[in-house]
Image (tube, grey):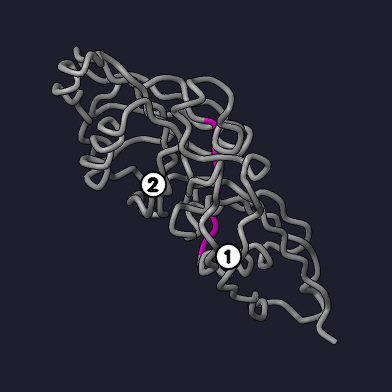
Amino acid sequence: MKFKHSIFALLVLLSPGFQAWADNSDEIESVKFEKFVSPIYPYGLTFEGVVDGDVEIAVDINKDGTIDDWFPLRSSHVKFTREIGRVIDQWVFKPILKDGVAIPMVLHMSFHFTFQGVISLTAGDQSHLFFNPSTGGSEKDRLVFNLSELDRIPTPIEVAQPKGVLGLDPEAAVGRVMIEFIIDTEGNVRLPVVREIEGPIELAYTAFDSISSWKFEPPVRNNRIVSARVRQSFVFSPVK
């Protein structure tokens, strides 16, 4: 049972010594690679007149530093995205610690490709860039859209109601949890992140486990199936 944190990350030159520094206000230690395989520029793109490009992704990191999931948020060319996909399964992070305890994390990463090599750029605050991708980059490169940009609100077709909150007296299981996540083009919930908690922390675990198994109708924008970022609130009331 887990729920994800998100952090501010600064990405520097990609190398085995790569580091990303977390926002110290949360007492989260620096993020480092245990194993890193660098993506490379797809040289066939030079014949298409493409000499550079950018990809932004969100990476879901487990407590042990392995990658649970990842999702492209923006890409200037599909071949750059495929190149990230080719190597990302080989990445392993050192466990990310908060107050000395390993935690799961959703990390935002940006990559700039050139035919001379690959370097990473400043990623910024994940909660801002992940869910407000209209800042920076080209509009046509966006792969994930806001709810207000869709033709209609995606309808849930499979819903798992939160089960009883373990470790809490039923009378104490009162509060609200806000979760943000991506709905992909198949209607699956991807990279859920707990954003707000009002009440005991156990409520967040319960809400996270519930939303992870939901299924939606695929989001549609301009009559085309796309991916979208949404928010879902869970309100917990005393059992009567």
The magenta segment is 2-8
Foreground: 221 or 142?
221
Q: Residue 174: where, in percent of width, then height?
A: 80, 70
Q: Secondary structure at mark 2?
A: strand
Does 207 sit left or right of 189 as displayed? right
Q: Residue 225: where, in percent of width, then height?
A: 48, 49
Residue for badge 1: 211
Q: Secondary structure at mark 1?
A: helix
Q: Which three-letter amino acid code belongs to the residue tagged 2?
A: Trp
Quadrant of the drawing holding the C terminus: bottom right
Residue for badge 2: 70
Q: Which three-letter amino acid code belongs to the residue tagged 1?
A: Ile
The residue most toward the bottom is 240
Q: Residue at x 61, y 33 (%)?
A: 132
Foreground: 97 or 210?
210
Which corner quadrant of the image does residue 42 belong to?
A: top left
Q: Residue 32: where, in percent of width, then height?
A: 36, 35
Does 217 sit left or right of 61 as displayed? right
**Above or below, 148 relative to 209:** above
